Image (cartoon, rainbow, N blue to C red):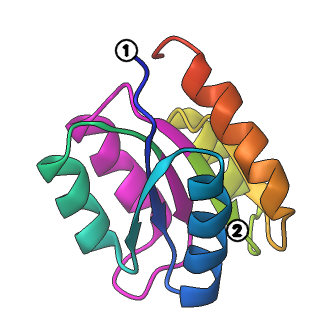
Amino acid sequence: MISKCILVVDDESLIRWSLRTRLEAAGFRVIESATGASALSEVARQPEIGMVFLDLRLPDTDGLSVLRQLRQLNPACRTVVMTAYGSPEVRREARNLGVDRLIDKPFDYDDTVKIAGELLAQQPA
């Protein structure tokens, strides 16, 4: 069964709200987190989370650290890293950690719905 639960991790409340609004309108259940610690807590507590939209710059940690731990908690979880600061080194490390997509900020919110549908329809990695 494909999980339609998505976690949006970003310290900017407007980005979380905008993503949640569009994803919920498309039929997904969305949980929000503003920090890496709360995101990892949600993933540990709710194994039905099938996808994470993850900002690279968080107030308590960096997104790559969260991604490493996320892979340990839920290796099959689909991941999309969002960043306005994606150096080639950071992008390479994210790919090495198995990120499904990298998207640059600002991004088209409607495209995120398409990305979510495509990734969640695929078999787990």
Residue kind at label 2, given as amino acid type? Thr
Question: Is residue 55 found left or right of 7 in the rendered image?
Answer: right
Determine if residue 88 is in view: no
Q: Residues within 10 Å of mark 2 (few under 14, many from 20)?
A: many
> As displayed, is residue 106 above or below residue 3?
below
Q: Quadrant of residue 99?
A: top right
- Measuring 59% from the left and 15% from the top, which residue is drawn there? 122
Question: Is residue 104 found left or right of 38 in the rendered image?
Answer: right
Disc 1, disc 2: CB below 8 Å?
no
Helix, strand or loop at mark 2: strand
- Measuring 74% from the left and 74% from the top, which residue is drawn there? 85
Residue pointed to by mark 1? 1
Helix, strand or loop at mark 1: loop
Q: CA distance from mark 1 to mark 2?
A: 30 Å
Marks 1 and 2, the one that precedes in the sequence: 1
> As displayed, is residue 99 above or below residue 84?
above
Determine if residue 38 is in view: yes
Start-end of magenta stretch:
52-79
- Measuring 82% from the left and 56% from the top, which residue is drawn there? 110
In x, y percent, where is residue 107? 84, 65
> As displayed, is residue 76 above or below residue 111?
above
- Measuring 64% from the left and 39% from the top, which residue is drawn there? 116
The question of residue 57 being in magenta is answered with yes
Residue pointed to by mark 2? 83
